Image: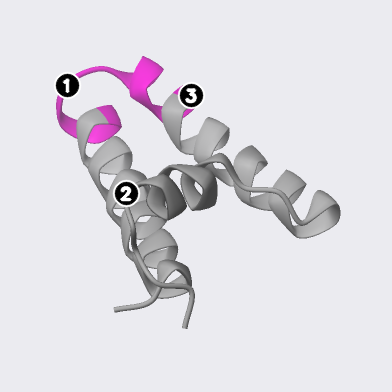
Amino acid sequence: MTRERWIRLIAGTFVMTSVALGTFVHPYWYGFTAFVGLNLFQSALTRWCLMDDILRKLGVPER
């Protein structure tokens, strides 16, 4: 699996998990949902993503 697909999988997992935690545990978890969304927004504008750097160092192929 490529880094782009891993990033999408991880971001989707984080969003779904934080929404569930916000619903069933405490509403403050929605802040994590907003954090993930802001990171996706900034990566679209700056073309830099921390998770991409982490996955690259772990040896996940680009394509």
Q: Specify which label sits upstream in the sequence, 2 or 3.
A: 3
Instruction: Count neighbours of disc 2 (C-alpha within 10 A) and say few if under 14, some if 14 to 19, many if 20 or more.
Output: few
Q: Earlier in the sequence, mark 1 or mark 3?
A: 1
* Residue at position x 35%, y 23% in the image: 29
Residue 28 % position (x, y): 38, 16
Disc 2 residue type (three-letter): Leu
Where residue 18 sits, quadrant-wise, is top left
Separation (CA) of disc 1 from disc 3? 13 Å
Amino acid type at image mark 3? Gly
Q: CA distance from mark 2 to mark 1?
A: 32 Å
Which sits in the foreground, 32 or 46?
A: 46
> Residue at (48%, 73%) from the top-left corner?
62
The residue indicated by pointer 2 is 58
Q: Quadrant of residue 50?
A: top right
Q: Which residue is mark 3?
A: 31
Range of residues picked out in magenta: 22-31
Find numbered disc 3 in the image and state the secondary structure of the residue it sits on.
helix
Label 1 Cα crowd, 10 Å radius (few <14 / some 14-19 / many 20+): few
Q: Amino acid at mark 1?
A: Val
Q: Secondary structure at mark 1?
A: loop
Kind of element beneath mark 2: loop
Residue that badge 1 annotates:
25
Q: Main secondary structure of the magenta part?
A: helix
